[in-house]
Structures are given as C-alpha cells and as structure tokens.
Image: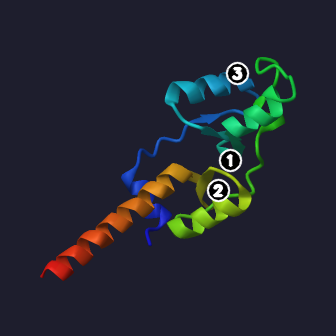
Amino acid sequence: METIEQLLRKKDRTVWSVHPNATVYEAIELMALKEIGALAVVENDQLAGMLSERDYARNVVLKGRSSRDTVVREIMTPPELRVRPDYTVEECMEMMTEERVRHLPVMDGDRLLGIVSIGDLVKSVISEQQFMIRQLEQYIGG
C-alpha cells in the first residue's frame, strides 16, 4: 500500500492557505478560484486548523451568518486531526471514514507538507488495483 509521502510526490504539492482572521468570504472565494474543497488555516507559519466547504455550509449558511462578517477562526476545524508522511493510504482512508472528514493535513513535526483529499486516496487505490490487475493478466497470459 502506498504511503502518503509517495502520494504527495505525485501530486501538486501547493498548499493553499488562509489566515484565521480572514473573512470566510475571502476563504470561499479562494477555494472557488483554486477549485478546491478545503484550505489550511495558517498563523505564524503554524497550522491553526482546516476550513472546508462543509464548515462553511454548517456554520455560516445554516446558521444565517454572513460570510463577509464571519472570520475563519470562528468556524475552522481545529488541527488535532493530522497525518505523517509514513501513514499509508489505507490508514488515512480509515481515519477519514471514522472522523467523517474529506481532507487531512500532512505534517512532519510542526511543518505542513501538504493536504490529502479523499479523492487523492481513491485515485491511489484505483491506480494500485489497476496495476495489480495488469500484473495478474500478464501472469495468467504467460
């Protein structure tokens, strides 16, 4: 099974982030521009949390708040949930399923290396399965 470090080497490692004092509107605007579903919330070069479209929907839209008047700090998810580069794709999928999240920050100590999404993990699993199928077909076909 592929590790998160191996997965990160294959994908765009740009980490889009927002400051905790930015407005939710600014954060959602950046997510839309970059076509992503979550942002790292970074303050003083440290991960302060994560902000996802789900956080926005549940904590701004459903509560009748204004995205222009609400700051990211008020609705972000705290950074307790994180993974190391040596975690496997399978371990991360299990964590995402149990915790009901779609994005995980990848940390090396206090350094943010990247963010993996459920889509990244599914692509990895599919790729690994396709490789295995090809290997089996070659073995059977001689």
Say which element carries label 1. Answer: strand
Say which element carries label 3. Answer: helix
**Tag 3 residue:** 25
Q: Residue at x 50, y 57 (%)?
A: 121
Task: Return the disc, 1 or 3, that comes first in the chain's sequence.
Answer: 3
Q: Residue at x 61, y 52 (%)?
A: 105
In the picture, measured across the screen, residue 83 lies left or right of residue 49, that is left
Disc nearest the viewer among 2 and 3: 3
Say which element carries label 2. Answer: loop
The quadrant the N terminus occupies is bottom left
Is there CB contact under 8 Å for labels 2 and 1? yes
Total numbered badges shown on the rendered structure: 3
Look at the image and tell me whether residue 41 can be seen: yes
In-front residue for pair 62/26? 62
Q: Residue at x 52, y 24 (%)?
A: 33
Residue that lies at the very extreme toward the left in this rendered image = 142
Specify the amino acid type for callout 2.
Asp
**Tag 1 residue:** 47
Rendering coords of residue 111 (x, y %): 59, 54
Residue that lies at the very extreme toward the front in this rendered image = 141
In-front residue for pair 136/42? 136
Looking at the picture, does residue 32 appear above or below residue 100? above
Crowd rating for badge 3 (residues with CA inside 10 Å; few <14, some 14–19, many 20+): some
The alpha-carbon separation of the residues under discs 2 and 1 comes to 8 Å
Where residue 110 is drawn, which disc sits there? Answer: 2
- Residue 100, picture quadrant: bottom right
Specify the amino acid type for callout 3.
Tyr
